[in-house]
Amino acid sequence: MGFIRKSSVMFFGFLLFFSFLALNSLFILGSSLQYDNVREGIYPIVKELSGTGEGNLIPKEIVGEFNLTKAAEDARDALKEHCKNATDYVFSYKGYTIDIPCEYANVTDPESIINKTFDDVIYDIYYKDYDCGFWDCFSKTEQPFFLVSEKAKDYWMNKFYISLLISAILVLLVFLLVQRKPNAFIITGALLVLSVLPLLKLGDLIYALAGNFASLINLFLSSTKTVFWFSLILGIILIATGIILKIWGVAEIKQKLSKKEAKPEGK
């Protein structure tokens, strides 16, 4: 019976390690795709695609022709005439809606209109209702911007919650199987720490292999350090909890034995 119990703990512990690995990876993807992170990360990519950025952040053939700068300049030329009878100028570019208030009609700095155009497109990219399944969107959309959308964030977070449920079930099984319950905390904490250790190095490896795609990859991995430290600290807390419970349990047993030995005979 002891062999079966130990084998079962090892088996479920093995599964729990990979479940934790998937859990952390999915949480990195989901939390990295918050709107503020996406806006900050995608802004220089959009600028480069429009001919106003620097460096080589992403090959242009991936997204095709996406010159927002020219679209903004065309809007600036039409703005004054259009705003004679309107309060804003709304137009579409590559399926994304851009709304420029007419107060921009008297702005002399062209960069302000360009930046407003970028902001609207990035917002629309993120919150657009992509009418396709996550994996189907690769073939059904002209540009793969859905990968950095709210749709993508929700997709990865849903997978994260499924992985969280599986991890919770495995933790419960380990807890039920181990004979000394404090060991369950130690095993769970140790597996959590071990599962999170490869994440930083894995991120470095992905960056090294990504080449021109490194800036885009950074969007998906921006929360790596936050998730790493959260899981590492949680794992250490669980290990410490298990050790404290073991020490407390041993001390309690010794105390009971001492009282028993000190009890007068016949009483």
Image (spheres, grey):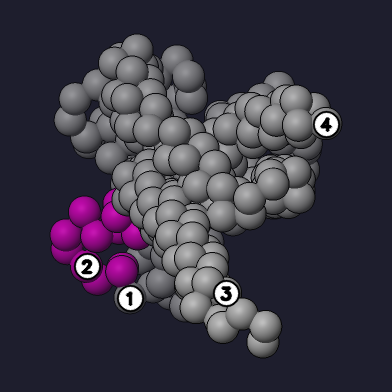
Quadrant in which residue 70 is drawn: top left
Measuring from the top left, give residue 153's x and y in whole percent. 59, 48
Measuring from the top left, give residue 123's x and y in whole percent. 49, 56
Residue at mark 4 to residue at mark 1: CA–CA distance: 79 Å
Q: Main secondary structure of the magenta part?
A: helix
| Residue in the picture at 83% in, 31% down | 1
| Foreground residue among 236 and 10 | 10
For disc 4, the marked residue is: 1
For disc 3, the marked residue is: 260
For disc 1, the marked residue is: 103
Residue at mark 4 to residue at mark 2: CA–CA distance: 81 Å
* Label 4 element class: loop
* Label 1 element class: helix
Question: Which mark sits nearer the N-terminus, 4 or 1?
Answer: 4
Measuring from the top left, give residue 86's x and y in whole percent. 50, 76
| Residue in the picture at 67% in, 83% down | 266
